[in-house]
């Protein structure tokens, strides 16, 4: 059974960088896209980025300038770094596994439980 | 890329059927047959209900069905149950870069 677990600090100061890691257990990272998605309090879901096991990436255009996604297949992990955070980046951050249709992202079939990140001084 | 458009809320009585719409553009829903739907209960992670417009993953209830016409996708829930009260999100592949876009979510109330 595949399991995803997010980890990282729950509190980040404005203008600093947010770093999160997702640990994948129960399956190989091959043949899927691995995403970060966030949900601000009371707001809907926002896709941030995905990465393949080979390191191919795709970013939300509105966040691309501040975000880097990376993968470590030897440890079955992938990570998110978001620079210059502001209060509006306060959200629950989920990692999720994405199935692939051809070369396109299909659906998020497995989700982590989510981790709350507060941006505050 | 713009978010897909969903109604903020819908409601129905137990046993009834309801439909939630998800409107996009020719650049997302209108081009890709890759609409997915998710159910989210408060404090929980979303759960996949429908993928590739109208396919159900193993384990998903057959009371949930998906369809699409033009730039609009729909999720229908038949035989409403109290446990269906949740928020529902649509999602699609979008644009030439094949990024991902979500709808704003629809809160379902079972009366």
Image (spheres, coloured by chain):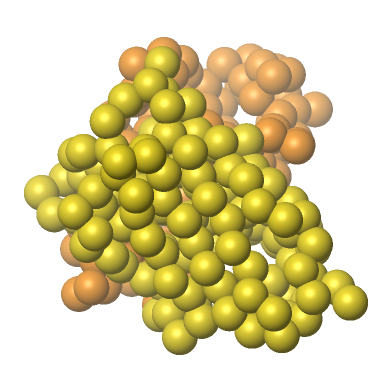
Chain colours: A yellow, B orange
Which sits in the foreground, B67 or A101? A101
**Can residue A105 be seen?**
no
Side of A63 where B25 appears, left or right? left
* Quadrant hosting residue A61: bottom left
Extreme residue toward the left, this view: A102
Q: Position of residue A42 (x, y in %)?
A: 77, 57
* Quadrant hosting residue B51: top left
* Residue positioned 75% across, 37% down in the render: B43
For residue B11, above or below residue B97: above
Task: Report the number of numbered marks.
Answer: 0
Quadrant assignment for the N terminus of chain A: top left
* Residue positioned 62% across, 36% down in the render: A113
Side of A7 where B67 appears, left or right? left
**Can residue A41 be seen?**
yes
* Residue positioned 54% across, 62% down in the render: A46
Q: Position of residue A64 (x, y in %)?
A: 43, 80
* Residue positioned 63% across, 75% down in the render: A17
Quadrant assignment for the C terminus of chain A: bottom right
Which sits in the foreground, B93 or B111? B93
Side of A22 where B99 appears, left or right? left
For residue A13, above or below residue B88: below
* Quadrant hosting residue B62: top left
For residue A46, above or below residue A62: above
Q: Position of residue A34 (x, y in %)?
A: 36, 48
Q: Position of residue B97 (x, y in %)?
A: 23, 73
Which sits in the foreground, A24 or A92? A24
Side of A113 where A64 appears, left or right? left
Extreme residue toward the right, this view: A121
């Amino acid at each position: 059974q595949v399991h995803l677990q997010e980890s990282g600090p729950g509190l980040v100061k404005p203008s600093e960088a947010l770093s999160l890691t997702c640990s994948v257990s129960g399956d190989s990272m091959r043949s899927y896209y691995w995403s970060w998605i966030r949900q601000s309090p009371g707001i809907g879901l926002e896709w941030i980025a995905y990465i393949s096991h080979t390191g191919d990436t795709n970013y939300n255009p509105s966040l691309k300038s501040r975000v880097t996604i990376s993968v470590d297949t030897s440890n079955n992990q992938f990570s998110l770094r978001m620079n210059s955070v502001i209060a509006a980046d306060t959200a629950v951050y989920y990692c999720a596994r994405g199935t692939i249709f051809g070369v396109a992202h299909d659906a998020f079939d497995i989700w982590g439980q989510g981790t709350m990140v507060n941006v505050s001084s | 890329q713009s978010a897909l458009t969903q109604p903020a809320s819908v409601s129905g009585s137990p046993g009834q059927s309801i439909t939630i719409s998800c409107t996009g553009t020719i650049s997302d829903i209108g081009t890709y047959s890759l609409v997915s739907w998710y159910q989210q209960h408060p404090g929980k992670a979303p759960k996949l209900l429908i993928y590739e417009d109208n396919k159900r993953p193993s384990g998903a209830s057959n009371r949930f069905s998906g369809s699409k016409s033009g730039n609009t996708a729909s999720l229908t829930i038949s035989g409403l149950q109290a446990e269906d009260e949740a928020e529902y999100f649509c999602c699609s592949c979008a644009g030439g870069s094949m990024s991902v876009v979500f709808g704003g979510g629809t809160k379902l109330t079972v009366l």
